[in-house]
Amino acid sequence: MTDIPALEGLIAASARQLSVGHYDDAQTEAAIAHVFGVDSELVEDGTYLLVERNGRLAGCGGWSRRATLFGSDRFAGRASGYVDPETAPAKIRAFFVAPDFARRGVGTSLLAACEAAAIAAGFKAAELMATLPGVPFYAAHGYRSLPAVTLDYHGTAIDFVPMHKTFQPAGDGPNIRREQIQSSR
C-alpha cells in the first residue's frame, strides 16, 4: 500500500508517453482520470506485482480472481465478487511500464508471473481489456482480440479491446525428445 503513490505516478507517465499515436491528449487524460490507476483490491489480494530495475520502479501489473475486468479504484463499473476458476477466466489487470523501461521485457516478465499464478490457482483461461498500444503486446503472447468497445467518459470516447487466452494444459506442449534438441545444434 505504501507504493501506491509511486505506482500512480508511473501509471500516469506510462499512459501519457506510451499512448502517443493511439489516443489523443483528451482521451489519455480522461482515461487517467476515470479508468487507469491502482486497484487497491489487487494490492490487498496480493496479486498486484511490481518490477524494480536498478532501484527504480520499472512496471506494474496484476491478475485477479475477481469479476472486475478493468479499472482502478476510480472506475465506476467494478464488480468485487470472486469468480470460479472452473467456469470463468482470471483477469489480467492494470499493466503499465515506465517509459524508460518500455520494450525491455518488463511487461513480459509481469505477464508470465501473472499467468503462472493464475494457472496455479486453477484458472484455465485469462481475459483482459487492452488499451490500443497494449494490443500488439498481448497478441504476441497468445491473446486473441474480440471486437473493440468504445467507452464514453464525460464526452470523450476511448476505444479498448477485450482479449482472451486459453491456457495450454500441462503436457500438451510440443513433444520434443532430447535427441531432437541435441541434433539441431
Image (cartoon, rainbow, N blue to C red):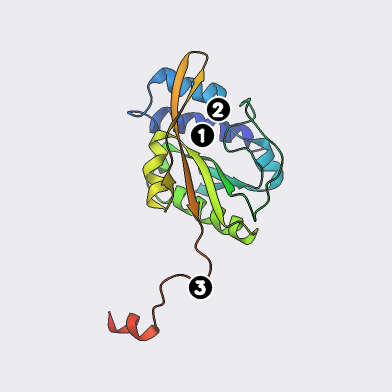
Q: Say which quadrant the C terminus sits in.
A: bottom left
Q: Residue at x 35, y 29 (%)?
A: 22
Label 3 – label 1 distance at C-alpha = 38 Å
Q: Residue at x 70, y 37 (%)?
A: 80
Q: Which residue is mark 1?
A: 10
Left or right of residue 69, residue 107 in this image: left
x and y percentages locating residue 21 in the rendered image: 32, 28
Q: Residue 35, labelled with which disc?
A: 2
Residue 175 visible in the shown view: yes
Q: Please, what is the three-letter code of the amino acid marked with disc 3?
A: Gly
Q: Residue at x 67, y 35 (%)?
A: 79
Which label's residue is closer to the chain start, 1 or 2? 1
Q: Which residue is mark 3?
A: 171
Which label's residue is closer to the chain start, 3 or 1? 1
Depth order, front residue of 71/14: 71
x and y percentages locating residue 141 in the rendered image: 42, 53
Mark 1 crowd level (few <14, some 14–19, many ≥20, 10 Å Cα): many
Mark 3 crowd level (few <14, some 14–19, many ≥20, 10 Å Cα): few
Left or right of residue 145, residue 82 in this image: right
Which label's residue is closer to the chain start, 3 or 2? 2
